Image (cartoon, rainbow, N blue to C red):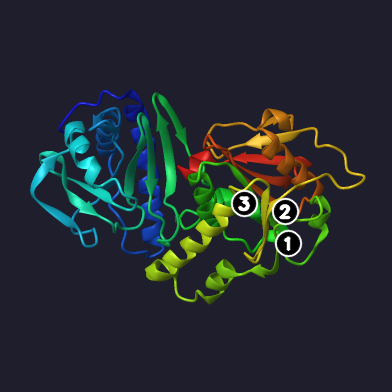
Amino acid sequence: MSRNSTYQAATAVAPTIEQHFLHQITAARQNSYTPLATPPTAQQVEAIVDTAFWASLRHEEGRSVKISLAFVSPEQAGQPILFSQLLPLTPAVLTKLAPGVDRPGIHVGVWVDENGLYIWGSTRVIPSLCFVVDVSEPGLLVVKTRRLDGFGKFANVAVLKGDQVQLVEEKSNGTGNQLGYLSTIIEKIPALAQLEATILVLIAVSMRAHKRGGSLLIVPADTTNWQNSLVKPVLYSLQPSFTGLATLLLQTEEPLADNQLKQDEIRREIDAIAGLTAIDGATIMNNNYELLAFGTKLGRPVNSVPVEKLIVTEPIIGSTAKEMHPAQNGGTRHLSVAQFIYDQPDTLGLVASQDGKFTVFSWSQEHQMVNAHLIDALLL
């Protein structure tokens, strides 16, 4: 490599990341997926992560560096912007480039020759399962990859913050097509089984982005039992329900990866729904993606009892479930949604905190209590 790594977390995590991408890409090749990225070696992972980390601690014109690096050759990239001269992969170069390539969806292309890693330009189009390092804030890096279906948020592989490393346990099917962790949650709620994890992640990302905090409840379309947990009257109830997102998803016949216009329309509808969660009170949507109400106050049904405990889990390899009182997991918003799930176990609750924490609440049949899933690591 062109430089020795001095970021110990990069050295520690590189072999694991190498094996992850090798496994994912090998499995995808066996299933005849194309085009696919080239898996990076541990040495390449270490060098790219190390350089990105030290760049993240720098500033350009008073602003911290935000940049996305993709390990991809110019030939593998779509419509690349090619520099006339190859640039060395160094923190100084990334710091200078960052202001021009910090918009969402732009990746700085990094490739390798006999002299080591270099920067060749930038692109918006990368192959499936491409190794990407995203510099989110000073000292915070997210290793991610483009999913095989090409739609939705990139899949997070690892989160590195300072000397802390979190490896994301996605529980995928070996092809990288789906957010397996959220899919597993949904599959355990028969009334909501038709929900798509990709859409829920996009909603969660949008909720998190407005930084005001908010909650979204997803309820079955074929029952009204959940209305017993609402404080009446519901001021912002919609009659008829708003079906903008539902209509778009029903109209989608071709793969979304092949229709950028439809992707953009879906994202606009998702942003509109997520924006309503910033209003005090819960937003409610059914499992057909129909918006039913927003700014809704939640209350305990008659004859119900307060929720006294819940189990907290997160999709991080090596983490263990913790049982605690709901008040220890968050504020009033978290407590009210936990109570809602306790009383309405066939529903799902999404809660964003102002500090970026994101929790999905569901009913655990296994533990017979509310399960708070901390999914921050999936959304960065």
> Foreground: 212 or 320?
212
Residue 137 drawn at (x, y percent): 37, 34
Residue 99 image-quadrant placement: top left
Q: Compared with residue 261, is residue 309 higher up or lower down, i.e. above or below?
A: above
* Residues at marks 3 and 2 touching, judged by CB atoms closer than 8 Å: no
Sooner in the amino-acid sequence: mark 3 or mark 1: 3
Answer few, some or many: residues within 10 Å of disc 2's Cα (few below 14, many 20 plus, some between 14 and 19): many
Residue type, mark 3 in image: Thr
Check disc 1 and report the residue beneath it: 220
Looking at the rendered image, the disc whose residue lies closer to the viewer, 3 or 1, is 1
Vertical comparison of 13 with 178: above or below: above
Task: Give the mark toward the camera: 3 or 2.
Answer: 2
Q: Earlier in the sequence, mark 1 or mark 2?
A: 1
Left-right relation of 315 to 177? right
Asked if the residue at tag 2 contacts the one at tag 1, i.e. Cβ–Cβ closer than 8 Å, the answer is: yes
User: Between residues 297 and 40, which one lies in front from this camera angle?
Assistant: 297
Could you tell which of marks 3 and 2 lies nearer the N-terminus? 3
Q: Is residue 365 visible?
A: no
Q: Position of residue 290 (x, y in %)?
A: 64, 66
Q: At label 1, which amino acid type do we have?
A: Pro
Q: Which residue is mark 3?
A: 184
- Which amino acid, by three-letter code, is at mark 2? Thr
Residue 178: where, in percent of width, then height?
A: 50, 56
* Residue 347 circle label: 2
Residue visible at 62% across and 61% down in the picture: 195
At a point 43% along the width and 36% down the height, the residue shown is 159
